[in-house]
Amino acid sequence: MKARVIVTLKSAVLDPQGKAIEGALRSLGVNGVQSVRQGKVFDVELAGNDRDAAEAALKEACEKLLANTVIETYRIEFA
Amino acid sequence: MKPAVILFPGSNRERDAARALKLVAGAKPNIVWHAEHELPAGTDLVVLPGGFSYGDYLRCGAIAARANIMNAVRAHAAKGGLVLGICNGFQILCEAGLLPGVLVRNARLRFVCREVLLRVERADTAFTKAYRKSDLIRIPVAHGEGNYTADEDTITELEKEGRVAFRYARPDGQIDETDGPNGSINGIAGIYSEKFNVLGMMPHPENYIEPEIGPTDGRGLFESLAGALKAA
């Protein structure tokens, strides 16, 4: 089973990298970009087909390692 | 005094830390590999050195914070044992939950490698007794992710409990919040745990201990530790 974990900064946390990317897009002449926030994507392959078990495992992975919940939130998606 | 300096893959200041402990505090530090489960018997100070553990992959300090040895470090801290995290070591302590908050990318996105002025916020801890309160000391920094941040409640609590160890300051002693090296909240350069036995700091006191190299303002920290552990 394949899943995707998306980790993003909480909205209250300043994202200087996103700001720099935003500025770079503007200087490249890409129009209409209002703001950019950078995050991380993890594509994970899981053994078995039990979706609930997979979701529980991924939640544990996020809480233990993939996200720092002081500044980040995460979202789990299944293909 | 029996210090243990923890070595992670990608640490690079472990020898500087060991050298400072030897030259200033007269100690014979053990270098302990991260995969170990126990600290050497009798360890009374754990130092997490600077560097780029695991290449800063995922988040600075995130993977090192989950290493085997960190359980032993956590147990040592829980018993009131002294722990000093410098630079990447500070990031590891935050990721390990031994200190609150987190260190994020410097506000101006630049890696900053230069000398800074630090204001010593209190001189009554095991790490700072050789200084005086409000001393301004010259210490170098070298980091890309030293921007200390935490939620408002945590910052309020740290300030209320006097747990800020050092702040980036200007020569007049005022706090350098807007013009500091990294954009840290309230100019925070280092913080203590609740019981003041764990200190995390971004600047490198271990690199300012020898007059041949420059200022020696970093000596005070190691002298303080030597004094605290001799008295204990």
Image (spheres, coloured by chain):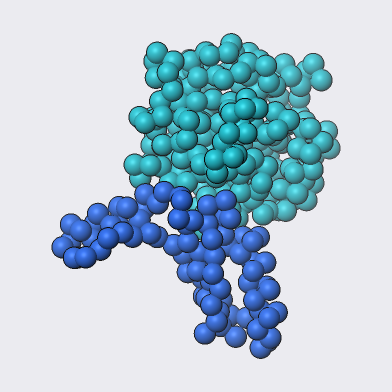
Chain colours: A blue, B cyan
Between B18 and B179, the one nearer to me in the picture: B179
* Residue drawn at point x = 61 percent, y = 48 percent: B95
For the N terminus of chain B, the quadrant is top right
Q: Is residue B50 above or below residue A57?
A: above
In the displayed image of the protein, which residue is found farthest to the bottom? A49
Is B68 drawn above or below residue B120 in the view shown?
A: below
Tell me which residue sits at (64%, 69%) in the image. A59
Would residue B212 be visible to someone looking at this image? no
Residue B132, percent from left and from top: 59, 11
Is B45 on the left-hand or right-hand side of A18?
right
Q: Quadrant of residue A32?
A: bottom left
Q: Foreground: B121 or B37? A: B121
Which picture quadrant has residue B115? top left
Determine whether A4 is above or below B185 in the image. below
Residue B64 seen in the current view: yes
Q: Quadrant of the C terminus of chain B?
A: top right
Q: Quadrant of residue B178?
A: top left
Residue shown at the point (34%, 42%) measured from the top left: B108
Judged from this view, the residue extending furthest toward the top is B132
Q: Residue at x 50, y 19 (%)?
A: B119
Q: Position of residue B60 (x, y in %)?
A: 52, 50
> Residue B161: horizontal and vertical position, in percent?
65, 27
The total number of labels drawn is: 0
Q: Is residue B172 left or right of residue B195?
A: left
Residue B116, position as x, y percentages in the image:
42, 25
